[in-house]
Structures are given as C-alpha cells and as structure tokens.
Image (cartoon, rainbow, N blue to C red):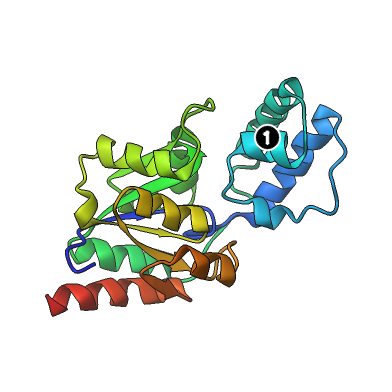
C-alpha cells in the first residue's frame, strides 16, 4: 500500500448513509410493480447490490416486472433528491485531507454514473473527486469487479498505485480481481464477518481513520 496514489471510493455505505432512501425506493418500486415486499428480507443487506439482481433474484420478479421496478425505483430516487441520505461524520474532512496530501480521488459505485454524480453534487461531495465510474444504465456493467476495471481504464490508473475503499465484500474482492489493495470500512452496510472473509489489507471503524492510515504510510516511505 505504500505506493498508493489513487484512491477509489465506494459511495453507499462508505461515504454516505443512504439506507433510508434506498429502502423507501425499493418498497415504492415493488408496490408500483404490483409485487408484495417480502418482510423477511432485510433491505439494508441489499445495499450495494445492482438493482437488476435485487429485483430479479432477491424478490423473484419476472423480467418485465424487474424492468418496471428499476424504472420506478430510479424515478422515485430522483424525486427524493437525497432526502433521507446523510454524509457520514468526518467524510468531508477526510476527503479534504487526502486531496491536500496529494492523493487522486475517484468514485467506483454500482450506481449508474449520472445518478452517482447527482448524489455527490447534491451532498456537496463532487468537488473532491477527479472522476466517477459507475454502473451502466443497462445490465452490461453492474458488478463491482467490472466497475473497478472500468475506472482503471477510464482514468488510466495503474492498479499497483491504486486502492479501493468500501463497505461490502464485493468492494474488496473486486479490488483483488483487479490487482489492487483494499481497505474495508466497518461502519457501512457489510457485516464485519463478511469483510474479514474478503481479506482486506486493513479494516477501518470510522471515516476519520482513513486519512491518517494512508498519510502515515506515505510519510513512512
């Protein structure tokens, strides 16, 4: 990790707590589609998964219902305009410190790129990042491994000098598949056991601990 100069951040569960917004939109989409929400499903555990996988695989919707649900979800998400979404404590300060320390910052998220851009702008986070790599609006690029690979290509980043930070095992496993280092944050939506099993380079319990961890390693070179 001593060579890291590029830091890729997940969005939901890493920079922002979007659990209320996402839960509301999933329930709205299911109702509009005529599906009955399964109360046994803990929506919080679904955050970070692609919408296609949530509606098709978790809620067992038909292809037509799934397409309709995704449309209703995105429409309602846009209408809410981040109501119910909050930036985690110390995130603004952490990003500022990393930027001032010479790190290049990027977003790698399962949210489609334009939607992620709007979230960041609405929450006054966009200015911290050089670029955003998100999922495609269709199903072509939706898993985290492909999204991270897309970010590396799009921004011409050397994997050996890049780091992924996220709250789900897919963030860590996606980084590994792209030959990158990874930090897991335990304050998001992934369980501690899930993250430990993915074997990140470090576990971080609060966003305020990210910048000191990276800055101290840079100074130690």
Q: Residue at x 40, y 75 (%)?
A: 208
Image-quadrant location for residue 104: bottom left
At a point 43% along the width and 58% down the height, the residue shown is 172
Q: Which image quadrant: the N terminus?
A: bottom left
Instruction: Judge from the rendering whether residue 219 lies leftward or rightward of residue 70; answer left or right.
Output: left
- Dot 1 falls on a residue whose secondary structure is helix
What x and y, as percent, mark residue 23? 71, 49
For the residue pair 50 and 87, the one nearer the viewer reads as 50
Choose between 41 and 137: the one closer to the eye.
41
Q: Position of residue 161 (x, y in %)?
A: 20, 56
* Residue at 11% across, 75% down: 221
Which residue, as the protein is rendered here, is positioned at the far top?
A: 64
**Is any part of residue 84 visible from this angle?**
no
Residue 48 visible in the displayed image? yes
Whole-percent x and y of residue 198? 47, 63
| Up-down relation of residue 26 to residue 195 (above or below) | above
Query: Residue 51 location in percent, x, y?
Result: 62, 37
In the rendered image, which quarter is residue 219 located in?
bottom left
The residue lying furthest to the left in this view is 221
Task: Give above or below for 137 relative to 36.
Answer: above
Query: Which residue is found at the position 50% from the left and 36% from the top?
Result: 142
- Mark 1 packing: few (<14 Cα in 10 Å), some, or many (20+)? many
According to the picture, the residue beneath numbered tag 1 turns out to be 73
Residue 64 is left or right of residue 135, and the answer is right
- Give the answer, above or below, for where 140 lies relative to 23: above
Count the numbered circles shown.
1
């Amino acid at each position: 990790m001593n060579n890291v100069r590029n830091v890729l951040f997940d969005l939901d569960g890493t920079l922002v707590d979007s659990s209320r917004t996402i839960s509301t939109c999933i329930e709205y989409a299911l109702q509009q589609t005529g599906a009955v929400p399964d109360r046994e499903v803990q929506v919080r555990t679904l955050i970070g998964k692609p919408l296609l996988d949530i509606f098709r695989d978790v809620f067992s919707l038909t292809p037509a219902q799934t397409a309709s649900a995704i449309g209703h979800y995105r429409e309602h998400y846009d209408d809410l305009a981040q109501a119910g979404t909050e930036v985690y404590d110390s995130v603004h300060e952490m990003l500022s410190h990393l930027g001032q320390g010479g790190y290049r910052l990027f977003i790698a998220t399962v949210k489609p790129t334009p939607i992620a851009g709007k979230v960041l702008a609405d929450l006054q986070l966009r200015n911290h990042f050089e670029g955003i790599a998100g999922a495609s609006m269709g199903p072509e690029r939706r898993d985290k491994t492909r999204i991270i690979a897309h970010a590396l290509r799009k921004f011409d980043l050397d994997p050996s000098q890049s780091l992924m930070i996220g709250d789900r095992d897919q963030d860590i496993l996606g980084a590994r598949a792209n030959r990158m280092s990874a930090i897991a944050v335990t304050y998001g939506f992934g369980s501690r056991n899930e993250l430990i099993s993915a074997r990140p380079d470090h576990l971080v319990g609060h966003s305020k601990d990210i910048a000191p961890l990276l800055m101290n390693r840079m100074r130690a070179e």
